[in-house]
Image: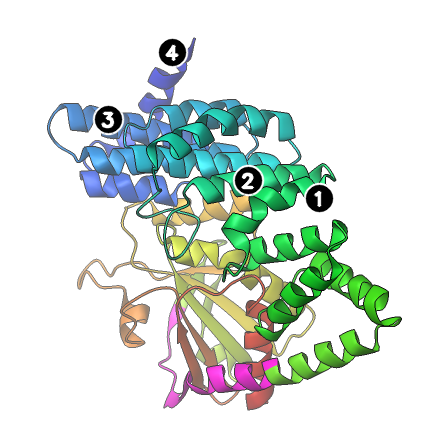
Amino acid sequence: MRILSIMLCAALFTGVVRAQTFSDLYNAVKSEPDPVKMGGIVKIMEKRVREGKGEEHQVQYCRQLVAVAFANEENFEKARQWANQIGDTSIKLTALYNVIDRMIAVGRFEDAEKLLKPTWEQVKKNGSRLQGAGGPFEDRGPGAAEFGALYGKILYEKGTYRESLEYLAPAFAGSSRRAGRELYAMALAKAGETDKALEQMNQLMLSQESRSEEFNAVTRKIFIEKYGDDKRYLWLKDSITADHKKKLEEKISKMKVNIPAPDFTLTDLTGKTVSLQSLRGKTVILDFWATWCQPCVGSFPGMQKAVDYYRNDTSVVFMFIHTFERSDHATDDAKRLLAYRKYRFDVYMDLKDTTTGKNEVVNKYGVKAIPTKFIIDRNGIIRYRNTGYISVDEAIPEISMMIQSIN
């Protein structure tokens, strides 16, 4: 049955990918939201490698993407199977780390422990580290301490806070990693280590990053326990909010421009045609993206929050412009991604001109890298330009501050 399902899945893609290069297949895996279909493309890539027409390392990385995609769908058996197909040790461990982390996030603690134990032992024995693209940390891949921290997270979620500290401290004490340091501080608080918890919480609050609701609630409680009320907590929070606003103003000031926005006409996924000229009098946010661009798609949870924030404000319009396509079925890819992830914003297709071979709108705007966003005022002037990933916590504060500054 398993062999038959693979054959059928591969057959679904044969007509689509027969003429595509190996690089096209690689990008197709990154663009595809459905893990089953991702797996079908990987099987075709494997065949190309056997024929000497592709790079095995790219296949290894794609197997990791499939494993993580199945984990995100909570199909952990499939996720484990795909992770175990990875031959490269560092890529395999990266996949397993993310699968285990997802198990913990959805409360599958016993399954997480079963998968974690042999993996953790391997890392401790061999001194392996997870290197390369896709690792969950920005500076280096996790080693024994970070895998141990996964066990610490399990203990924390089970309510054994003091025991969790033994595993969380080596990975997160003094770390710059937001989520890990929050967890460590909360574990200290719930284990009764009030002074140590306060030290960590003060440092975290002064770092100016946004904090989770759970962290804020635990921190407020600790301040009350220590000082008898929440006055010091509220004072610190208010002063930090003011300082954070100042830093945000400094950040977006570097994105300022003042040039006329080139006019264009594009069609959305429903067939509706819209021109920029027709939106004169409104504030327009352009977001240039592509399905194969992981920072683009990774920004969508935050951008969806921003769209929802302005849902009832008819003076603000968001246009998500798909561009730089790498396949001849880019429109279908975009539709499938939105449907699969349940995003509710308007997507417009800036497809390559059949004569020039260029994506005309993105070319007019001089975009060389995506995601890139433009904030256009009511008079058709570009006032801000921002290139790069935007997190779920950054989208609303940054975009709303830009919009307020020009209206």
Q: Quadrant of residue 371?
A: bottom left
What is the CA distance from the residue labelled 4 to the residue labelled 3?
A: 17 Å
* Residue pointed to by mark 2: 150
Q: What element does badge 4 sit on? A: helix
- Dot placed on the residue nearer the N-terminal end, 4 or 2: 4
Q: Nearer the viewer, mark 3 or mark 2?
A: 2
Residue 250 drawn at (x, y percent): 49, 86
Say which amino acid is labelled 2. Answer: Leu
What segment carries the magenta color?
244-265
Q: CA distance from mark 1 to mark 2?
A: 13 Å
Answer with the quarter of the image where residue 53 lies: top left
Of the pair 63 and 362, the residue shown nearer to us: 63
Asked whether the residues under the numbered discs 3 and 2 touch, taking CB atoms below 8 Å apart as contact, a structural biologist would say no
Tell whether position 255 is magenta. Answer: yes
Residue at the disc numbered 3: 46
225 relative position to 378: left or right: right
Mark sitting on residue 4: 4
Rendered image coloring scheme: rainbow
Give the Cα separation between the discs numbered 4 and 2.
36 Å
Q: What distance separates the C-alpha of mark 4 from that of mark 1?
A: 47 Å
x and y percentages locating residue 380 in the rendered image? 45, 86
User: Could you tell me which residue is drawn at 21 percent across and 58 percent down?
Assistant: 354
Task: Locate the N terminus and report the quarter of the image it occupies.
Answer: top left
Disc 3 or 2, which lies upstream in sequence?
Answer: 3
Q: Which residue is mark 1?
A: 161
Between disc 1 and disc 3, whose residue precedes? 3
- Residue at the image position 41 percent from the left and 34 percent from the top: 124
